[in-house]
Image (cartoon, rainbow, N blue to C red):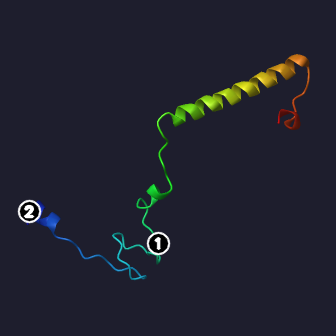
């Protein structure tokens, strides 16, 4: 028997206790969904330019926080969580 013939032969799948056939023979729960088949329902890739806009906004917020911290140190004040908000 050569490699091609060997590749064509299939071993029968084992049945799990739940009755569902799974390639690994693992236990399969009723109404379960296989990984990799449902992610498209809730994951949407970001639109063009959206990541750049979010990154610019985050950098602007960080810069504002650093400026506030610098101003409070310069004035000799102590920055508390209540005064930062």
For marks 1 and 2, the one nearer the N-term is: 2
Give how far across and how far down residue 42 sits, in percent: 51, 56
Residue 32, labelled with which disc? 1
Q: In the rendered image, which residue does mark 2 sit on?
A: 2
Quarter of the image with the N terminus is bottom left
Mark 1 falls on what kind of element?
Answer: loop
Give how far across and how far down residue 76 sits, in percent: 91, 20
Marks 1 and 2, how far apart in space? Answer: 39 Å
On the rendered structure, is 53 left or right of 5?
right
Instruction: Identify whether 82 is placed above or below 11.
Output: above
Residue placed at 75% from the left, 28% from the top? 65
Q: Nearer the viewer, residue 21 or 80?
A: 80
Residue placed at 41% from the left, 59% from the top? 36
Instruction: Identify whether 27 is placed above or below 84.
Output: below
Residue 70, labelled with which disc? none
Q: Quadrant of residue 55?
A: top right
Give how far across and how far down residue 77 sits, in percent: 91, 24
Residue placed at 70% from the left, 24% from the top? 63
Instruction: Identify whether 41 is placed above or below 64.
Output: below
On the rendered structure, is 14 left or right of 72?
left
Q: Nearer the viewer, residue 38 or 18?
A: 38
Point out the residue furthest to the left here: 1
How crowded pointer 2 is (Cα within 10 Å; few <14, some 14-19, many 20+) is rated as few
Mark 1 or 2, closer to the camera: 1
Mark 2 falls on what kind of element?
Answer: loop
């Amino acid at each position: 028997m050569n490699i091609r013939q060997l590749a064509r032969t299939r071993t029968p799948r084992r049945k799990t206790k739940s009755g569902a056939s799974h390639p690994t023979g693992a236990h399969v729960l009723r109404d379960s969904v296989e990984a990799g088949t449902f992610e498209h329902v809730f994951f949407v890739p970001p639109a063009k330019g959206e990541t750049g806009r979010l990154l610019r906004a985050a950098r602007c917020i960080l810069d504002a926080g650093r400026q506030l911290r610098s101003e409070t140190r310069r004035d000799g004040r102590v920055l508390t969580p209540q005064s930062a908000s």
